[in-house]
Image (cartoon, rainbow, N blue to C red):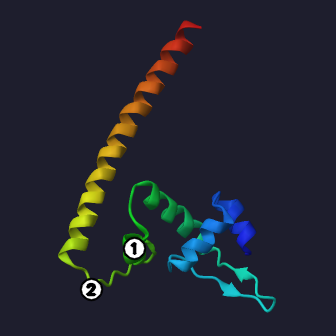
Amino acid sequence: MRIGELSERTGTPRRLLRYYEEQGLIAADRCANGYRSYDERFVDRVLQIRGLLDAGLPTRIIKQILPCLDKPRVIHFKDATPEMLATLEEERDRMTQRIECLIRNRDAIAEYVDTVRADV
């Protein structure tokens, strides 16, 4: 698929997709006319990258953990440093806290909606 379709399917601006490519997060084949051509698997990959960026991970860390996102999962971290592992653990814990907060907020909104609908 071309960059426009990948952009549309993931809600990611083309400029940002080019940036992901520059950072080594995704890769495009080139057609004879020079246009980028992306494999179908990059739809999920881009969505995962966006989620990780939204969670606060920098692209350099995302690039290192991308093999963990693929299925089947094949993890090769010969160069994993204690600092990288500590960063990932901190980010995991921060994500867990955000998830718990989102769940509480979702449940509060659901309770509010249920209460309002019951009174209507």
Mark 1 is on which residue type? Arg
Between the residue at mark 1 and the residue at mark 2, the CA separation in whole angstroms equals: 13 Å
Label 2, secondary structure: give it: loop
Disc 2 crowd rating (10 Å Cα; few below 14, some 14-19, many 20+) is few
Residue 29 x/y as whole percent: 66, 87
In the rendered image, the residue lying farthest to the bottom is 32
Q: Secondary structure at mark 1?
A: helix
Q: Quadrant of the C terminus?
A: top right
Q: How many marks?
A: 2
> Pointer 1 and pointer 2: residues touching (CB < 8 Å)?
no
Percent from the top left, x then y, of residue 72?
Answer: 43, 78
Instruction: Point out the residue furthest to the left here.
Output: 82
Q: Which residue is mark 2?
A: 79
Question: Where is residue 70 shown, x and y percent of the image?
Answer: 45, 75
Of labels 1 and 2, the one closer to you: 1
**Which residue corresponds to mark 1?**
60
Q: Earlier in the sequence, mark 1 or mark 2?
A: 1
Q: Quadrant of residue 33?
A: bottom right
Taking the spot 47% from the left edge, 19% from the top edge, the residue there is 112
Left or right placement of residue 9 versus residue 88 in this view = right
